Image: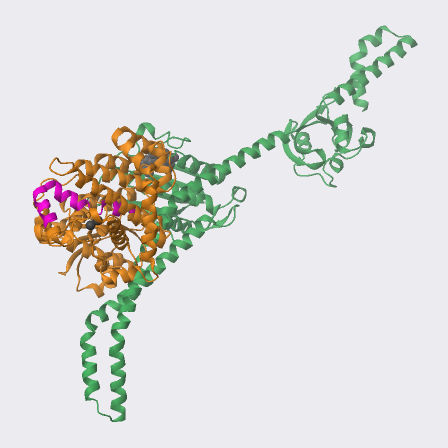
Chain colours: A green, B orange
Amino acid sequence: MNKVIQVNKKHLSAQTKTNQSSTALQFEKTLIEHAKKELSNILDSIPLFIALIDKNHNIVRLNMPMANALGMHPRELVGQKCFEFCHKTREIPDSCPHKRAMEEGISVTVALFEKNLGGHVEVTATPFFDPDGTLIGSIHVVRDINKRKKAEEEKEEIISQLLQAQKLEEVGRLAAGIAHEINTPSQYVASNLEFLKESFDEISPLVNSCAKLIQATSHGDSTESIFSEAEKALEDTDWEYLREELPLAISQAQEGIDRVTKIVRAMKEFSHPGPKEKTYQDINRIIETTVTISKNEWKYVSDVYLDLQEDIPPVYCIADEIGQVILNMVVNAAQAISEKLGENPEGAKGSISISTEKEKEYAKIIVKDTGTGIPEDILNRIFDSFFTTKEAGRGTGQGLSIAKDIVEENHDGSISVTSVACEGTSFTIRLPFNDSAQRD
Amino acid sequence: MASKNILFVDDEKMVLDGMRRALRPMRKLLSMHFATSGRDALGLMEEKPVDIVITDMRMPGMDGATLLGEVKTLYPETIRIVLTGQADDDATYRAIRVAHQFLTKPCPPDILKMVIKRACMLHELMAHPLLKKAVSSLDHLPSLPSIYVEIQEKINDPEASVEEIGAIIEKDLGMSTKILQLVNSAFFGHYKNIESPSRAVSLLGLNVIKSLLLTLKVFSQCDNPKLSSSFLENLWNHSFETAVFAKNIAEDVTDDKDISDHAFTSGLLHDVGKLVLAYNLPDKYKKAMKVAVMEKKELRKAEFRVFKASHAEIGGYLLGLWGLPGDVVEALSFHHRPHQYPSNNFSIPSMVACADMISHELNPDECTGTLPHLEQAELKRSDPTGRMEKWRVMCRETKERGIE
Ligand SMILES: Nc1ncnc2c1ncn2[C@@H]1O[C@H](COP(=O)(O)OP(=O)(O)O)[C@@H](O)[C@H]1O
Ligand SMILES: [Fe+2]
Ligand SMILES: [Fe+2]
Ligand SMILES: [Mg+2]
């Protein structure tokens, strides 16, 4: 407080020298009072929280809006430790900008969430020097950034909704394919079961007469008529054929059930893969799941080869989002291959290879296809939102821009592409195994 | 029946293996062949004639619709069936145009067996040497009317509205007048005042309007000065009546709208074979009619004597070539012997047979030869609860209301 008055005195010193009388002194006092009043009025009318804090975190003065926000009179606050009232703590908080401003002599700005100051705020601490140039404290200016925060949160919300919408669209598109992937094995499971039923009907007379034959023999009864019955039953049963086909029918029915189970499980994993927050995930499993549920998208035009490093460490990521990235890559690859194959009455197939590999602190995922390739003049635009070379209904141009967002913004990774026109395309994704905080 | 060559096409070998096993009980009836792609299927067909093709829809390379399209042009008598795991995809709509039957996976084995049995019967009928000879003596088989094709194509466009379909009909002024006349008749209940084809489509359903259009067009294609106008008029009236009656009967036994629509279409077209025969060979047809009257025979028996085939088989054959739904093709072929049609229940051929008989009973003067005769077996199947009597009353009422 005293220092501030000193400043005002200096300012008024020219007048002080010319008016030496007591009235003059009185006048000077009034002037000072006026100036003081003017200053606090000005400070009080600024719709920001302003406080002067000394080196030891004591509040030297503060404006009315700030005192109001803290629910006290400025008089009650002067001389108190700022952190006790602003942050309601006994210790100096880590985020304190004052400390750094004091240490480094520069203006420091931090964003905080402080209930006592009205929510999201941005605090700037600017070093404050006395007229001799000695550092005596800092001026705190606290801005309300709730609106800005809210807008940012809304934007994030919109982005996450967009992501969700794209995902739902993708799942919708996949749904028909998944139905197909379930209906096909169901067909041969049903056929093989029918065969088992018929075969049982065919075999049972034979087994019955064999049983009779055994019984008669063990009782020492005449077996002649039973024997010829059994002989006839054997003749009527195409055992040669059944002996070969029955085990196959059973194993193919089992295989069909396995296929259905696998796709249903993959679908469940893909549509609710668990936490929306990052956790350590098996990247290979995410890839396998995605390849399974998208099978109907690629199987008519391509084979998929997986070369996944078995002992790759888990990746700190949101499984849901990474699955979506892989899905976009696979669908793009299949579409590029399909386009290259064209009419294709021969039923030729391209290939999609996906590999994972540990590369220093990154998981490196490569998705490579033998599709059309990407012409050089558009290579730098493919990650743009809504950039597409496909007709409506096949592409919306969002896949890669969303993939880039997920990989780079949300996971601190990188995504890059190389392509040779007419030969194929290769996308490389790098995802850090660990959280950025832990890596530092 | 000679054993039929049946070809299964699916890119999944397991589906084929399963099929082979499940259909083993039919091995006396079927000689089975398998192909894992459209190309292989066509290659195989080049080497040996195939009577029935059952194909998957989505396959690498050539898909099922394309394959059946090829089969339709190369081997028009082959029965074409789709068995698909994916029922909601535009390729499926394409398939409807080239397939006689449309089945979805997983198809229960007993249904599959039934469908195959019917296909065998149908093929047997269509491939009968006598029928083929009869057909080859016909120079002018009516073609599938282009307006029908146009509407069919419009339906395949999922964006198409009822108005657009109405607009196609409106372009043909004569047709649209006739259609409106028909739908406003009391036969269809009490709509009256249906002023536009699109309104007719939304009230009566596209299937009904489509088949009216098809039949009207075929009748006008077969307008020949050598045919008496009373012959054409009687035949049209009888066809239309049979269609309405068959629909009534279908609605009495089932809630399935597809069945009642197909019953209507089948009724409308059931005697189209008469038209085709009379149009191509009017003098011979007059002779057949004379034989029927003089010898007090059913007309179809007289036709057999003269042409070595009756209008039922000829009509079925024609619709088979056009690729109309298998249900309708079968109903036509079997409408005079529904008891021979493989089915567990009262089916469309029986509905048409009953409707046909009732229509003749109600117009005894217009029937050439004796009334069509329904096998005892068939009457039993349709009449366990006195339904036949009920239908007679119902149809008479419809007719009286229609004449009002
Ligand atoms: N694997 C690929 N091969 C060839 N071109 C590709 C490939 N992946 C992406 N592209 C190109 O990048 C464009 C943008 O891709 P994307 O953002 O997924 O949108 P969309 O697939 O909806 O068009 C595509 O339209 C295509 O031209
Ligand atoms: Fe008839
Ligand atoms: Fe008739
Ligand atoms: Mg894409």
> Which percent across, then down, holds residue A288?
38, 51
> Which percent across, then down, holds residue B174?
25, 30
Above/below status of A71 relative to B309: above
Is B277 within the magenta? yes
- Quarter containing the C terminus of chain B: top left
Is A91 within the magenta? no
Residue A246 is left or right of residue A165, and the answer is left
Residue A95 is left or right of residue B385, and the answer is right
Between residue B45 and residue B225, name the one nearer to us.
Answer: B225
Image point 42% across, 55% down: which residue? A265
- Dominant SS of magenta comes to helix
Between residue A342 and residue A312, name the one nearer to us.
Answer: A342
Magenta residues?
A: B264-290
Instruction: Kindly tell me whether residue A350 is visible in this rendering.
Output: no
Q: Residue furthest bottom?
A: A220
Between residue B314 and residue B294, name the one nearer to us.
Answer: B294
Quadrant of res B167:
top left
